Image (cartoon, rainbow, N blue to C red):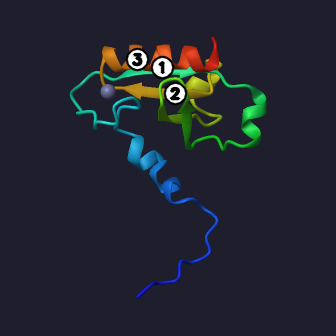
Amino acid sequence: MKRKRSAKKKSPLESAWTVEKWIDRCAWCAKPIPEDVEVFGISISLKPEAFQEIDRGTVQPLLLMQAGKTVPMMVVSDDSPTRHAGKDAVFQLCSDTCAKALQSALKQELGS
Ligand SMILES: [Zn+2]
């Protein structure tokens, strides 16, 4: 018996991109980061145009075409220290290896 799907406009994948899910996970390998491990962070600036589609204080999927990956970008809120430092979004990584991998993928993608 087939059930009728409710006519939601949201994609099924959308629920995967929540702050709750990603707050303690590595943006690159998606593994949970243990509490006693030092977290590596990468912060980036975004073009003001980007914020027509992005809400601050949320997690947004960032497609990295070259790397064939989508990573969770945490868009910081206006009152965040990161924002005051002139950055708009952060990624947290579990290791130096993941940080380097993401950094080079971002370079390829954003060209900066
Ligand atoms: Zn990792």
Q: Secondary structure at mark 2?
A: strand
Q: The disc labelled 1 sits on which kind of residue?
A: Ile
Q: Residue at x 47, y 25 (%)?
A: 67
Q: Earlier in the sequence, mark 3 or mark 2?
A: 2
Gap in angstroms between the C-alphas marked 1 and 3: 11 Å
Q: Secondary structure at mark 3?
A: helix
Q: Earlier in the sequence, mark 1 or mark 3?
A: 1
Q: Residue at x 21, y 28 (%)?
A: 36
- Check the image and name the residue furthest to the bottom: 1
Identify which residue, 104 or 83, lies in the foreground: 104
Q: Are marks 1 and 2 in contact (CB under 8 Å)?
A: yes
Quadrant that contains the C terminus: top right
Identify which residue, 51 or 85, lies in the foreground: 51
106 vs 68: above or below: above
Q: Secondary structure at mark 1?
A: strand
Quadrant that contains the N terminus: bottom left
The residue that mark 2 highlights is 90
Q: The disc labelled 2 sits on which kind of residue?
A: Val
Gap in angstroms between the C-alphas marked 3 and 2: 15 Å
Q: Are marks 1 and 3 in contact (CB under 8 Å)?
A: no
Q: Residue at x 40, y 17 (%)?
A: 101
For label 1, being within 8 Å of ligand 1 is answered no
Quadrant of the image occupied by residue 58: top right
The residue that mark 3 highlights is 101
Q: The disc labelled 3 sits on which kind of residue?
A: Ala
- Tag nearer the camera, 3 or 2: 3
Gap in angstroms between the C-alphas marked 1 and 2: 6 Å
Q: Residue at x 53, y 23 (%)?
A: 66
12 vs 45: above or below: below
The residue that mark 1 highlights is 42
